[in-house]
Image: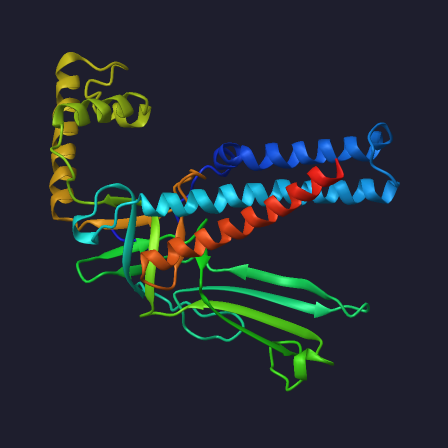
Amino acid sequence: MSISPDCSVKRPTLDRFMRSFRLKEFLLFGGIWLGSFLLLHGSRLTIDPPPLRLLVALTLAVAIISAYGALYYGRRAWRLADTPIARIRSAPQGYIELYGRARLMEGPPILAPLSTLPCAWYRYQVEERTMGNRWQIVDSGESDSLFLVDDGTGRCVIDPQGADFIKIRRDGWYGSVGGARTQALWGIGAAYRYTEQRLIPGEELHAIGWFRTVGGLREAPDTRRDVAELLERWKHDPQRMKLFDRRRNGRIDPDEWEAARRAAEKQVRREQLQQTVEPDIHLLADTGDPTRPFIIAAFREEGRLIRYFQWRAAACLLVAALAGGLLLHWL
């Protein structure tokens, strides 16, 4: 079995969206409803003048969003601390952490669109200066090509779709059309602003996601079951069944069915033999479960990644507490 670097694992996006439609949306819509209530019915409360009602509603929104952020980042830190670290050669199937270095797969090189530098993954953004001296995004994108992580014991293919990339090197510059750099100080007079993130081959990598192995024989084959499943598929293929109707009478007689069964068994055993000689291919991809994040970080230390989320959870909690204190003071 071979995998092209340009191929990616398809997954049901609608199911993932419905699973993620939980706490965040509940808090958001709850905050909008409560804020609207305060704006429309604030006259019944001791919140005057009307501009103060708007300030209360905005503070409430900040408190709710910050509370969600504290839960979001705190849950990620806890999930990382609770996830086993594995070596690729002996990794269990399921949600795990891997350490290693980024490597390229065989095939065409992956080139970052703006800098044209070789990389394992990229993300870019092009902004244009508008008449109001604001920056407006006119182009953006990111790589969905597969790449590898190598930890010394084996290699694992990474499908980057849906991953949260953290601490990836970032380059930014100002220029003209086509990405040519200018010497404009702080972008004064420049028409475009370019931002590019790149994961470099050989760079240290910390990846957390859903690990599975394909190819080879992962368990003892069940020949009888496989033959029955193949015969069931053949029964729904008129062209295939016609090959076994040697008497051309429009039906499969018992001896003809036995010939079909022997042919199916021969094909199953041939496929099983081929599987035994195929090398295992390890894959790490998005879990499709919002409670189990798919994270790729450009550093090795697990503690650093956990602290990354802990500090953000603490900052969100502090903002939520301050906003809550203001609300209690006003109400």
Residue 176 versus residue 219 in the image, above or below: below
Judging from the image, the colouring scheme is rainbow
* Residue 5 visible in the picture: no
Where residue 50 sits, quadrant-wise, is top right
Residue 322 at x, y percent in the picture: 63, 47
Horizontally, residue 237 falls left or right of residue 117, namely left
Q: Nearer the viewer, residue 55 or 155?
A: 55
Q: Nearer the viewer, residue 11 or 86?
A: 86
Horizontally, residue 242 falls left or right of residue 24, namely left
Horizontally, residue 83 falls left or right of residue 113, namely left
Residue 232 at x, y percent in the picture: 26, 21
- What residue do we see at 72% from left, 32% from top? 34
Q: Nearer the viewer, residue 133 or 308?
A: 308
Q: Nearer the viewer, residue 58 or 100?
A: 58
- What residue do we see at 78% from left, 45% from top? 55
Residue 304 versus residue 60 in the image, above or below: below
- What residue do we see at 20% from left, 53% from top? 87
